[in-house]
Image (spheres, grey):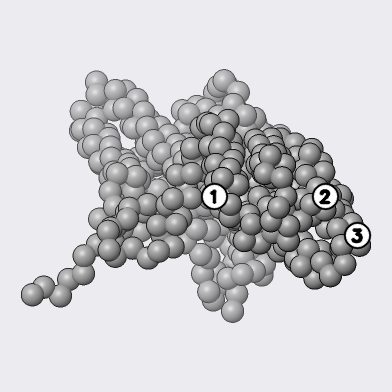
Amino acid sequence: MSDEKAPPPPPGHLTTGTAPLTLYIQHLLQRLRAFDRRRPMMWDLSVTGFWVVVAVLDYSTGGWRSVARNVDAPEPLVLLMSLCFSVPLLWRRRRPMAVLVLMAPASLLNIWTGAVVQAALLQLIPAYTIALRLPLKNLAGAGLLMCLPAAAGAIAIRGTADRQLVSYLWAFAFVTLLAIAVSTRREYTEALVERAHRLERERDQQARLAAAGERARIAREMHDIIGHNLSVITGLADGGAYAAAKNPERAGQALEAIGTTSRQALAELRRVLGVLSEPAPAADLTPQPSLADLGTLLTGVREAGLPVGLTVHGSPPPVPASPGQQLAVYRVVQESLTNTLKHAGPRATAEVTLTYTPTGLDVRATDSGGAPQPPRNESPSHGRGISGMRERASLYNGTLESGRLPTGGWQTRLRLPLEDTHP
């Protein structure tokens, strides 16, 4: 025999002979509530008709005589009292106080005549509705409407206080506590449902925010990769076209550099897009660019025709900057040199300066300008270049300044705190 257990039945499914009694009861109550929501008037007529039939049967079979103090009470009066206790139940949900008011004279008559028809217990149904749905101040009025006839009968008929008044008080107290318990449980369940819905909405909102943040991060990466490499390729292509007529060997070197740069750009794009299209275990785990890759970056820019130098002041801290901080520095330098290639003109030169201080890292990328070019975009609202650099700086509590120099060139300056990198 197999030791595997059968899967549990789906919610709401009942298996004959195996489901606990409580599941059957819950299932039945759910069906009754669903029927009540669909056809409330039909439900009220069904409930009222049931109790009218029970009251009339109690009268017709003489069952009321088994508990009556006066078995000789007029039968038409007994039938009238039975109908007065059962028929008003049709309005028990819309006008429960009015129903109790209609039943109160019949209750007084029932006690005074000694008939004591058992249909008088139907007063507990509107009393339960009042305790369940109406404000607390209505509960006192309901108690008076139920217990005053019993109190009057106990005063007029000696020896009936224990049998009538006390039983009415206990019955009213019971239905009141039951209604309070049901109301409390209903409110608690509604609060749990609302809390679950709120948590679900917050979860969806967090997921949307995380997705938006990830899209922004990927957009920055795509912009930096494509923008820089296309600028390098454009510079190489212009230089190769110029050298093709005079120095074919130099043109061939430019084409070879274009191919190398294109392959590097494609590899970086595949790495970024692989994170979106592949499961986490299969994603490309190539490290992100760091400060150690600045030399390779500058070599590619020089091959594109932009003379650029690198100067480092100070010493790196004992604990190096985090990978995210190093990537931010790399991308800022990359974007700055890309802007120089686009806007500074063919005779421009550039300089990158890294200055380590006791509390941080200062990165300057400057160019000398050149032939007049269209103005660079300094507004973060009209492109992702400078705004993307500012976003990267703000991720690590850094600041970024970018603007034109008095000499006509352009400077981008990144200040990045590195306090957290010290031991």
Specify whether residue 64 is in view.
Answer: yes
Mark 2, Cα crowd under 10 Å, few <14 / some 14-19 / many 20+, is: some
x, y percent for residue 353: 57, 53
**Left or right of 189 in this view: 208:** left
Residue at horizontal 72%, vertical 42%? 77
> In 3D space, how far apart are the residues under numbered discs 2 and 1 (Cα atoms)?
23 Å
Q: What residue type is labelled 3?
A: Ala
Q: Which amino acid does label 2 sit on?
A: Leu
* Mark 2 vs 3: CB contact within 8 A: no
> In 3D space, how far apart are the residues under numbered discs 2 and 3 (Cα atoms)?
11 Å
Using the image, determine if residue 153 lies above or below residue 91. Answer: below
Indicate the secondary structure of the residue bearing disc 3. Answer: helix
Mark 3, Cα crowd under 10 Å, few <14 / some 14-19 / many 20+, is: few
Residue at horizontal 40%, vertical 64%? 21
Q: Which mark is residue 156?
A: 3
**Which corner quadrant holds the N terminus?**
bottom left
Q: In which quarter of the image is residue 161?
A: bottom right
Mark 2 or 1 closer to N-term?
A: 1
**Left or right of 210 in this view: 411:** right
> In 3D space, how far apart are the residues under numbered discs 1 and 3 (Cα atoms)?
29 Å
Disc 1: which residue:
61
Disc 2: which residue:
108
